[in-house]
Amino acid sequence: MSPGPDPIEAYLAELAQTLGRFSRGRRRLLAEAEDHLHEAADRHRETGASQHDAELAAVAQLGPPGIVAAADPRRRLVIAMLGGAALTAVAATAAVLAAARSHDALGMIGSGQLVPPSIARDLGPARPIPPDARIDATARLVTGATYALVTYRSRGWRCEATFIIGPSGLAATHGLGGSSSCLPPGAPFPPVDLGVESGSTQGVVLAGTAPLAADGVLVTTASGRVRMFPLPHIALYSDPARQAVIVDRSAAHIRRVAHVALRFG
Amino acid sequence: MRSELLKGHLDMLVLAALRSEPAHGYRVVERLRVLSEGEFALPEGTVYPALHRLEREGLLRSRRTSHQGRTRRVYSVTGAGEQALVGKRTEWERFTAGIARTLVAAG
């Protein structure tokens, strides 16, 4: 069996493509990623792994290029303008919607916000939801009434935000990083399903357990390449034929893969 | 610890990991793994947005070095970073104490 392409080289090419030619931090990020991958691969080789397997493991550990590319200031600016800055405004809606979806959690969600200063800084200045914004999906409390997911659209952009709901209200947020917060007009929007509820329109959840308990999904593609998709960026479904489907929100497209292995934390 | 929970506190953890001595990205990840006794399992690439963000905010500084023919960027905590870490730690301790009190009171 062919060992496939050089995993580190392929990863760096994909990262370069993700960053774009005019990224301000392109050269620096590529150099840092390259150094990181080679050092990680060195460690794996020290344990007896082949060069190819060591590189595969290093790539899987680093995560999708979009995660590293999020360090690029220009990409972060776009995220802040289109996604992150709106999260504060959406937060109250998220809590209300989440409460409406989970009667058990009603008593846990208050009107006040408990947002640590560092989190508030990450959120950026509060902005009203644009007049044409429409909450077009769901907020859902999962895993012990802790998380809420909201998707909304504004001027053709579709965005999603995930919140951690604490006992005293909104306690913290996540999902600010990465480019999955908003998708441009016309982009295919993957179905939103955190995978906890079975019997959804997307099909039965893989593995029968809450995928949110996993750190991510290791995927071996047809070319033999191994990639890890961290959970904030993916959702897992199986279609009626029980073929595994991975929705990579960061890339806004659906991948059907031959082999899926859940890595539980 | 779940990645989602960890993300909001990554800045504090990165500052803590760099407090003792300067390090490059891979070493920061390693330190987080060792210091947390394997509890933190974020994709390793997550550390780079945090490192760059902290440097832009003046909490870290970096310098470029060369290691075995490869370019390596080594980060260290600035004075402002030291102060920020103290603040973040205090904030975290108050926050978790509040959560714990609430959960205990709720039974």
Image (cartoon, rainbow, N blue to C red):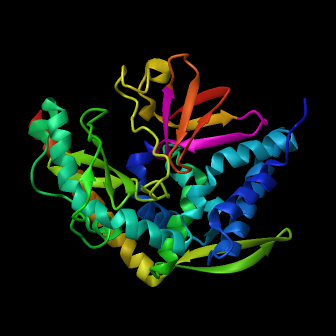
B88 falls in the magenta region: no
Drawn side of residue A211 relative to residue A19, left or right:
left
Q: Is residue A257 above or below residue B9?
A: above
Look at the image and say whether residue A235 sits in the magenta stretch. Answer: yes
Which quadrant of the structure image shows residue A33? bottom right
A35, A175: nearer the viewer: A175
Q: Nearer the viewer, residue B58 or A199?
A: A199
Q: Nearer the viewer, residue A183 or B90?
A: A183
Residue A95 image offset from top left, x and y in percent = 18, 47
Q: Position of residue B65 (x, y in %)?
A: 74, 77
**Image quadrant where one finds the N terminus of chain A:** top right
Residue A42 x %, y %: 80, 51
Which x, y percent locates residue A170?
A: 21, 52
In the rendered structure, which segment of residues is drawn in magenta?
A221-237
Within the image, what quadrant is residue B51 found in? Answer: bottom right
- Establish if A191 lies above or below B34: above
Q: Is residue B18 visible?
A: no
Q: Is residue A194 above or below residue A205?
A: below
* Residue B89 appears in the figure: yes
Image point 14% across, 30% down: which residue?
A104
Which residue lies at the image location 86% right of the left edge and 44% below the top edge?
Answer: A51
Q: Residue at x 26, y 36 (%)?
A: A141
